[in-house]
Structure formats: C-alpha cells, structure tokens
C-alpha cells in the first residue's frame, strides 16, 4: 500500500469517534488514540466523572471522554 492510500481523500473518508465500520465501533480514549472495537467485545460500561469506562473482553479498559448515554447509543447504532 502506498503512502497516498493511507491518506484521507476527503471529508467522507475521515474516521470519526462513534462511527460504525462493519462490526467495529470507533472510540477515542483519554490519550487521543483511536480504537476500532468490536461492539460484541464490550462487557461492561461504567460512568466515571463525566466519562465512560469501557471494559473489553480480555480485561482492557478504555476511558472515553463521553457520557455513558452517548456511548450506549453508539453501541446500539443510534448515533
């Protein structure tokens, strides 16, 4: 894959937090890193100081700087 294939070509090619791509949900953690999370791998959501802790199968925890109801809506597919 060439370098140009990895660059966004326009606004519709940009990935955004909360976007669904196939079975994956894009989440941005507290450090600004984007994660593509299989929606079925989320085992627990916990509200924490205006953010949401997302526990994935395998024990990995992401802190997402969004309210719990927003993350639930993303997981449900109701952006």
Image (spheres, rainbow, N blue to C red):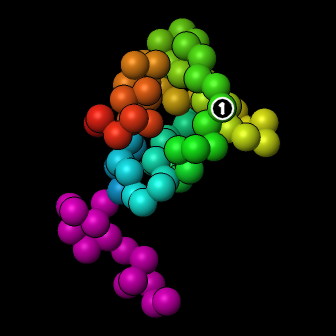
Is 55 positioned to the left or the right of 28 in the image? right
Q: Is residue 24 magenta?
A: no
Q: Position of residue 12 (x, y in %)?
A: 22, 62
Q: Position of residue 30 (x, y in %)?
A: 56, 32
> Which stretch did the figure color magenta?
1-14
Name the residue: 58% across, 44% down.
Answer: 40
Tell whether 13 sits left or right of 24.
left
In percent of the image, x 37 and y 74: which residue is there?
A: 7
Is residue 4 part of the magenta span, yes or no? yes
Task: Inspect this view and state whether residue 76 appears.
Answer: yes
Q: Is residue 14 shown above or below 3? A: above
Check the image and name the residue furthest to the right: 58
Kind of element beneath mark 1:
strand
Seen from the viewer's position, the closer of residues 48 and 76 is: 76
Viewed as shown, does residue 62 lie left or right of 18? right
**7 vs 37, nearest the viewer:** 37
The residue tagged 1 is 43
């Amino acid at each position: 894959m060439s370098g140009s294939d990895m660059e966004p070509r326009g606004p519709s090619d940009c990935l955004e937090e909360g976007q669904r791509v196939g079975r994956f949900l894009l989440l941005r953690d507290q450090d600004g890193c984007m994660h593509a999370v299989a929606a079925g791998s989320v085992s627990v959501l916990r509200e924490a100081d205006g953010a949401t802790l997302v526990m994935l199968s395998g024990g990995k925890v992401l802190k997402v700087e969004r309210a719990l109801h927003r993350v639930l809506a993303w997981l449900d597919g109701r952006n």
